[in-house]
Image: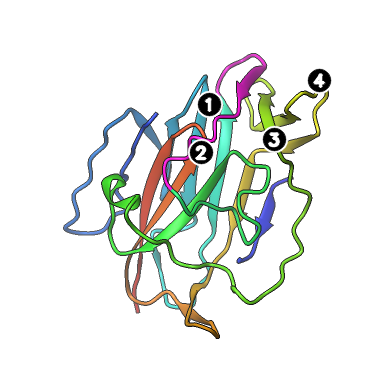
């Protein structure tokens, strides 16, 4: 069952989102899978996909962002954990990346893969809130994916039995971002262009853009 978290290799992809006057290029073979979604090959037969539920939103509107790590092979696929994240700041909600092998970040403006490492993502979670986080494993060694799907058994270092089996898909639904210090407030996404960047721990990255307009 996919978790929806309301906020709550190197291979790069920049995908057109229908914004007039913007040019887009790709530096690796990738597939556009929907109105505002794309996937890219990762390591050892895995594919990382990122999708948004629209290309254009209004201020205050919730944006559903979905990530999925899929085994494209017709056989069981055991992939060692790598901790080779393509950039900092990735999460799947207020508890970080949890036990997933991927995460996402949002940036204000139109950014490309070459920009991301030098940018600070928008804060999608209330910094003063206390969130009930589920069990998070330490020392994950292996993700063992079932054939042709996104279900994976997660192993810890030194264990021959999985600690858990999980669907490697997650979604966040931000309506804005948090600003201010020491007291933070929620700010709606203002009119403009935004960048959504997803990455996995094997170094794959996929980028989409969306527009907020009155």
How far apart are the alpha carbons under marks 3 and 2?
Answer: 16 Å
The nearer-to-camera label among 1 and 2 is 2
Mark 1 and mark 3 lie on one chain; the one further toward the N terminus is 1
Q: Which residue is mark 1?
A: 46
Q: Secondary structure at mark 4?
A: loop
Q: Give the crowd class for mark 3: few <14, some 14-19, many >=20 residues within 10 Å.
A: few
Location of residue 44 in the rendering, given as x and y in whole percent from the top left corner: 52, 19
Q: Which mark is residue 139?
A: 3
How far apart are the alpha carbons under marks 4 and 1?
Answer: 22 Å
Residue positioned most to the top: 75
**The magenta stretch spans which residues?**
72-87
Mark 4 and mark 1 lie on one chain; the one further toward the N terminus is 1
Q: Which mark is residue 31?
A: none
Location of residue 167 in the rendering, given as x and y in whole percent from the top left corner: 70, 38
Location of residue 78 in the rendering, given as x and y in whole percent from the top left corner: 65, 19
Q: Are marks 3 and 4 in contact (CB under 8 Å)?
A: no
Question: Relative to 184, does residue 145 appear above or below in the rendering?
Answer: above
Q: Secondary structure at mark 2?
A: strand
Residue visible at 76% across and 64% down in the picture: 132
Give whichever of 55, 186 is nearer the camera: 186
Q: Magenta stretch containing residue 9, yes or no?
A: no
Mark 4 and mark 2 lie on one chain; the one further toward the N terminus is 4
Q: In the drawing, does residue 189 fall left or right of residue 164? A: left
Q: Secondary structure at mark 1?
A: strand
Q: Secondary structure at mark 3?
A: loop
Q: Are marks 1 and 2 in contact (CB under 8 Å)?
A: yes
Q: Which residue is mark 2?
A: 200
Residue visible at 42% across and 33% down in the picture: 40
Q: Which residue is mark 4?
A: 160
Residue visible at 52% across and 36% down in the picture: 201
């Amino acid at each position: 069952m996919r978790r929806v978290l309301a906020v709550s290799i190197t291979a790069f992809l920049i995908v057109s989102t229908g914004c007039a006057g913007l040019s887009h290029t790709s530096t690796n073979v990738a597939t556009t899978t929907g109105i505002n979604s794309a996937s890219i090959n990762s390591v050892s037969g895995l594919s990382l996909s990122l999708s948004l539920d629209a290309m254009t939103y209004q201020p205050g509107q919730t944006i559903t962002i979905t990530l999925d790590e899929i085994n494209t092979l017709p056989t069981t696929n055991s992939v060692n954990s790598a901790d080779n994240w393509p950039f900092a700041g990735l999460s799947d909600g207020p508890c970080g990346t949890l036990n997933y092998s991927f995460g996402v970040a949002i940036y204000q403006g139109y950014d490309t893969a070459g920009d991301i490492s030098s940018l600070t993502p928008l804060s999608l979670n209330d910094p003063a809130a206390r969130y009930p986080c589920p069990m998070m494993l330490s020392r994950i060694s292996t993700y063992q994916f079932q054939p042709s799907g996104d279900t994976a058994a997660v192993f810890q270092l030194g264990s021959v039995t999985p600690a858990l089996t999980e669907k490697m898909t997650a979604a966040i639904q931000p309506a804005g971002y948090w600003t201010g210090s020491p007291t933070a407030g929620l700010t709606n996404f203002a009119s403009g262009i935004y960048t959504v960047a997803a990455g996995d721990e094997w170094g794959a990255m996929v980028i989409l853009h969306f527009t907020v307009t009155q």
